[in-house]
């Protein structure tokens, strides 16, 4: 499939560590020079974990998120997919259905899949190997921003950043990218994943996602 024109409507191109990156409204980052797609915090199996503890939540979000990833990989024709931590939600055994869906995803995706280990990921899941960090010079990928080397440009996840736009209320809580100096933090990709409000501080830039568009917070 021929990749989409970049930047497409709704995306936002930024310069980071001397590289052109494209922030996507689909809560991922496209790196054209590496033909790579990067996302974080999918938390596969989270709803099943809730149901196992007697909390009634709907099913189906895992397949929805797999479809979203596949669509992005195909849309941009990438060679590499880097998931920067918390691919899984917990170490409990995956349901047969989810295990089979993830195996089908792994085998059918036309891109190399690289998993960077997150705090929720467990070694007992052997569908895909994991690494602790990924060095894609000049940028390093690591799950927790606290583990980033200050002098090394880093893309991370873990924080599940949200920003508040307009009046108070849940509708004003938008997923966002957060950039500060040598750090770029991605929003959580998972459909069934909460987040944390980030207030813009000096030297930080927030990029909220609304109406399938990545904006720059003017504050």
Image: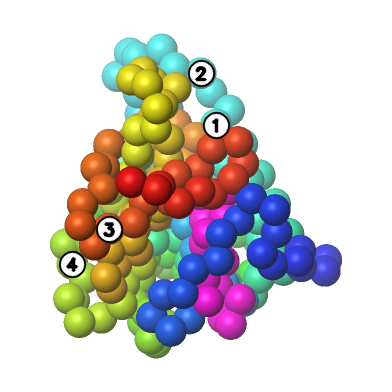
Q: Position of residue 47 (x, y in %)?
A: 42, 27
Circle 4 is placed at which residue position?
147
**Which stretch is magenta?**
20-34
Q: Are marks 2 and 1 in contact (CB under 8 Å)?
A: yes
Taking the spot 41% from the left edge, 75% from the top edge, the residue there is 16
Element marked by disc 3: strand
Numbered badge on residue 61? 1
Q: Is residue 60 visible?
A: yes
Cα–Cα gap, marks 2 and 3: 36 Å
Taking the spot 27% from the left edge, 64% from the top edge, the residue there is 180
Name the image quarter holding residue 144: bottom left
User: Up-down: is 120 above or below 21?
Assistant: above
Q: Nearer the viewer, mark 1 or mark 3?
A: 3
Q: Quadrant of the N terminus?
A: bottom right
Circle 2 is placed at which residue position?
58
Taking the spot 41% from the left edge, 12% from the top edge, the residue there is 56
Q: Tell me if mark 3 has few (under 14), some (14-19) or many (20+) residues whose alpha carbon lies within 10 angstroms of its own.
A: few
Cα–Cα gap, marks 4 and 1: 30 Å
Q: Main secondary structure of the magenta part?
A: strand
Q: Are marks 3 and 4 in contact (CB under 8 Å)?
A: no
Element marked by disc 2: loop
Cα–Cα gap, marks 2 and 4: 34 Å
Taking the spot 70% from the left edge, 53% from the top edge, the residue there is 9
Circle 3 is placed at which residue position?
204
């Amino acid at each position: 499939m021929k990749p989409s024109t970049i930047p497409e409507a709704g995306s936002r191109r930024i310069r980071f560590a001397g590289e052109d990156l494209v922030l996507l409204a689909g809560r991922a980052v496209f790196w054209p020079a590496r033909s790579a797609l990067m996302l974080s915090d999918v938390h596969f199996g989270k709803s099943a974990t809730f149901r196992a503890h007697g909390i009634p939540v709907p099913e189906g979000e895992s397949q929805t998120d797999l479809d979203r990833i596949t669509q992005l990989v195909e849309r941009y024709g990438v060679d590499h997919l880097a998931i920067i931590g918390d691919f899984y939600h917990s170490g409990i055994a995956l349901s047969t259905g989810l295990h089979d869906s993830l195996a089908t995803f792994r085998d059918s995706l036309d891109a190399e899949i690289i998993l960077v280990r997150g705090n929720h990921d467990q070694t007992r899941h052997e569908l895909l190997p994991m690494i602790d960090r990924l060095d894609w010079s000049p940028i390093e990928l690591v799950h927790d921003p606290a583990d980033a080397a200050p002098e090394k440009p880093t893309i991370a996840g873990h924080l599940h950043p949200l920003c508040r736009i307009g009046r108070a209320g849940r509708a004003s809580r938008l997923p966002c990218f957060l950039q500060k100096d040598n750090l770029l933090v991605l929003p959580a990709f998972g459909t069934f994943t909460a987040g944390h409000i980030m207030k813009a501080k000096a030297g930080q830039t927030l990029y909220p996602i609304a109406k399938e568009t990545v904006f720059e917070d003017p504050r």
